[in-house]
Image (cartoon, rainbow, N blue to C red):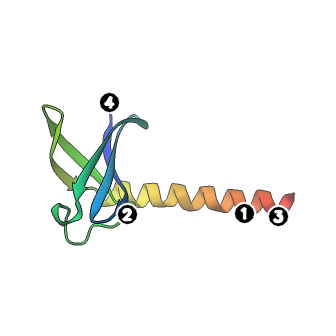
Amino acid sequence: MKERRLSYQDHEDGIATLILFENEKIIERFHKDVGELPDDAAIGDQYQPEIEDGELVAMQYDEELTKKKQKEVEDAIQRHREKRLED
């Protein structure tokens, strides 16, 4: 089963970069005007995408997945810190 998610990665000059993952493999990048995102959108947020004919037509915020991905990043940072202390 293919699991898709859309990750809000960055924004610059009012343009948001969203990366589409399929089973943790990057499939495509989308660039959207920040004003088209939900008002409370933040970098790191994860969404369930709706794509039609290669166009991103909708995205539904996924709170559980966002928390999971944030925890994975925090855990990786902690492992890195611990490794540096060992060296």
Q: Distance between the residues labelled 2 and 4?
A: 24 Å
Disc assigned to residue 43: 2
Disc assigned to residue 27: none
Name the amino acid, label 1: Arg
The spot of residue 22 in percent (x, y) is 35, 34
Please say if 51 is above or below 38. above
User: For residue 67, what is the image quadrant?
Assistant: bottom left
Answer with mark 3 or mark 4, whichever residue precedes in sequence: 4
The spot of residue 15 in percent (x, y) is 28, 59
Disc assigned to residue 85: 3
**For discs 2 and 1, the disc positioned in front in the rendered view:** 2
Tag 3 and tag 1, C-beta contact below 8 Å = yes
SS category of the residue bearing label 2 = loop
Answer with mark 3 or mark 2, whichever residue precedes in sequence: 2
The spot of residue 26 in percent (x, y) is 40, 37
Answer with mark 2 or mark 4, whichever residue precedes in sequence: 4
The spot of residue 76 in percent (x, y) is 61, 55
Q: Distance between the residues labelled 3 and 4?
A: 39 Å
Answer with mark 1 or mark 4, whichever residue precedes in sequence: 4
Name the amino acid, label 4: Lys
Residue at figure coordinates x 27%, y 50% from the top left:
31
**For discs 2 and 4, the disc positioned in front in the rendered view:** 2
Name the side, left or right, on which 18 lies relative to 75: left
Disc 4: CA contacts within 10 A as few (<14), some (14-19) or many (>=20): few
Residue named by callout 4:
2
